Image (spheres, rainbow, N blue to C red):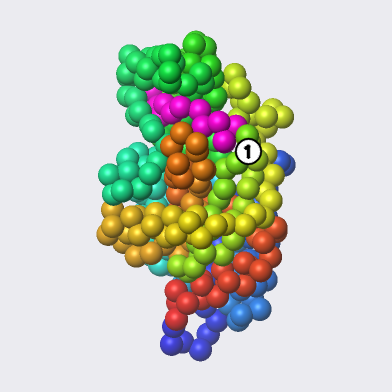
Amino acid sequence: MTSSRAPRIGIVVTDAYADEDPDYDTPLLLPALADRGADAAAVVWHDAALDPASFDLLMIRSPWDYPERPADFAAWLDRAEHATRVVNAPATMRWNLDKAYLGDLERAGVRVVPTTYATTASAAADAIGALGTVGAVDRVVVKPAVSAGARDTGLFAASDPAALALACRIIGRGDVAMIQPEILELSEGREKALYVIGGEFTHAIAKGALLAPGGGFRGGVYRENPVPVDATAGERTFAAEVLRAVQQVTGGDLPLYARVDTVHSARYGLCLLEVELIEPALNLHVAPHVTGILADAILRVLA
């Protein structure tokens, strides 16, 4: 920016969070931006009084209720994009909204967890049945293609009718059901989230196992337990390869921020679970050195 005034930055949030899943990032990010001379404020995406044009930049941070009203969020994103600069890029976020993007990345050479995308009950039944055959897996994961926070995601024995019932509920409301084999290492809590901000690896987090066998969450609620962990050179390289594939597939710029969820599977190798480019929790409260890195990266967007 060439203007002498402080850049006005909106950090996009929502107005209510579950007690067990608060937004830890925004309260740390706002003062870091203020310390660097920015006029930064948290803004609720569905606040009718919000004027996107009054900001030089809107950064999507924690609008975690958008899966409950996806059409509203898509319409808001359209308005915001036409009024000001939004990060990550709205086109990239739209692509990332539907987990069918994993198929795009797989075709681009990224190893992902094997997935069947079912649009009918019979297709879901066939996929679950195929995974439950002798020599395959004992348990399956069922989840919607459009979701966040593991909503409507379940881990079931392949023979459990509840697996197909969940798939049918997902399909019945017009979504696509994703059917995957259980990754034993995930059930053992060995998922690792790799964070890339401004094109640089910043930190890695393990959050423990979330799904309870038979459906639902361990402990009854969605609760992450983020713990900083080391990332190997191979994992860092994998994260960079994933983001290069994202750019290849979308034709867009490198995302400002990304969370690359991975697992080392004895059966499948190092796999991508998700690449979250919309509103990932960055877990700044357990990686405080990243707060300044993120604030600097945001301001470089406006430089």
Q: Please give the name of the residue rendered at 61% of the width and 80% of the height, measured from the top-left corner.
A: 36
Q: Where is residue 104 drawn, in percent x and y?
A: 30, 45
Is any atom of residue 284 visible in this view?
A: yes
Q: Where is residue 248 drawn, in percent x and y?
A: 28, 57
Residue kind at label 1, given as amino acid type? Gly
Q: Please give the name of the residue rendered at 51% of the width and 47% of the height, measured from the top-left corner.
A: 261
- Image vertical order of residue 251 relative to residue 1, above or below: above
Which of the image's four quarters has the C terminus? bottom left
Q: Please give the name of the residue rendered at 32% of the width and 24% of the height, measured from the top-left corner.
A: 119
The residue range painted magenta reads 171-187
Magenta run includes residue 86: no
Q: Nearer the viewer, residue 74 or 118?
A: 118
The image shows a total of numbered marks equal to 1
Is any atom of residue 61 visible in this view?
A: no
Magenta run includes residue 176: yes
The residue that label 1 is drawn on is: 189
Q: Where is residue 82 drawn, in percent x and y?
A: 34, 62
Q: Nearer the viewer, residue 97 or 282?
A: 282
Q: Is residue 46 left or right of residue 125?
A: right
Q: Which of 247 and 10 is in front in this view?
A: 247
- Image vertical order of residue 74 relative to residue 294, above or below: above
Q: Is mark 1 on a helix, strand or loop?
A: loop
Q: Residues within 10 Å of mark 1 (few under 14, many from 20)?
A: some
- Image vertical order of residue 34 relative to residue 182, above or below: below
Q: Please give the name of the residue rendered at 39% of the width and 54% of the height, measured from the top-left corner.
A: 242
Q: Where is residue 255 drawn, in percent x and y?
A: 42, 62
